[in-house]
Amino acid sequence: MRPILQVALDFIDLNRAVKLAKETVAGGCDWLEVGTPLIKSEGLGSIRQFRQLFPKITIVADMKIMDAGRTEVEIAAKSGADIVTVLGHASNETIKECVNAAKNYGAKIMVDLIEVDNYIERAKEVESFGVDYIGLHIPIDEQMTGKISFDKLKKVTKTVKIPVAIAGGINSETAVDAVNSGA
């Protein structure tokens, strides 16, 4: 699988997000992530708007689901999301409900392992539930230190068979390292 460029639209203003989305899609972006701040500030209508504006681009809804998995996946998928995120700290039942709902609504599930201590074991476990992607998310506070390591990425990609995404702090200088580490 070739590397995929996903651009996170972590804005609170829909107009700014749309402007950046148009620029990045024109520049070759593969996936657009409707970020959590945008979903919280503008609602599910933001997902609908991106689906309408970019019908051929994969739309990721960064819902960060922790509970009520079936319902949250349903509303995101019905709004136009192709991929919906659920947190790795969610219960096994919540993640399984997300997977089942995604199948019903033609979406896929990415489990975000942000701040999961036993990330290798959890990656294997959620893969067995039928999730489509694993996401490794570098927290903003950690990014600010400037010390971004791809060690977790290397370990997880050696452990699971499904695609692994990395998010947070990736830029033109670190993207090659991310890809070389398995993203």
Image: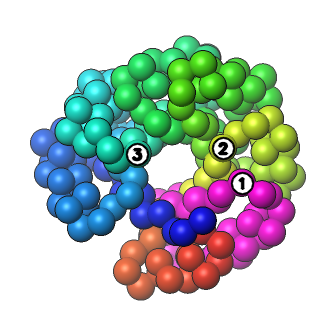
Where is residue 95? Give x, y as percent: 71, 29
Secondary element at tag 2: loop
Q: CA distance from mark 1 to mark 3?
A: 17 Å
Asked if the residue under mark 2 is in contact with the one under mark 1, i.e. CB atoms within 8 Å, the reply is: yes
**Residue 38 is covered by the magenta coloring:** no
Q: Is residue 68 above or below residue 16?
A: above
Would residue 125 be found to the left or right of residue 91 on screen? Answer: right
What separation in Å lies between label 2 and label 3 (alpha carbons)?
14 Å
Residue at the image point whose x is 40% and y is 45% from the top: 58
| Other-residue count near label 1 (Cα within 10 Å), few / some / many at <14 / 14–19 / ≥20 | some
The x and y percentages for residue 156 are: 76, 63
Query: Would residue 70 be seen by someone viewing this image from the given angle?
Result: yes
Mark 1 or 3, nearer chain start: 3
Mark 3 residue type: Thr
Residue 162, which numbered label? 1
**Label 1 vs 2, first from the N-terminus:** 2
- Start and end of the magenta stretch? 138-167
Q: Is 29 situated above or below 90?
A: below
134 to 173, vertically: above or below: above
| Amino acid type, mark 2 | Asp
Q: Which mark is residue 58?
A: 3
For the residues labelled 2 and 3, say whether their Cβ atoms are less than 8 Å apart.
no
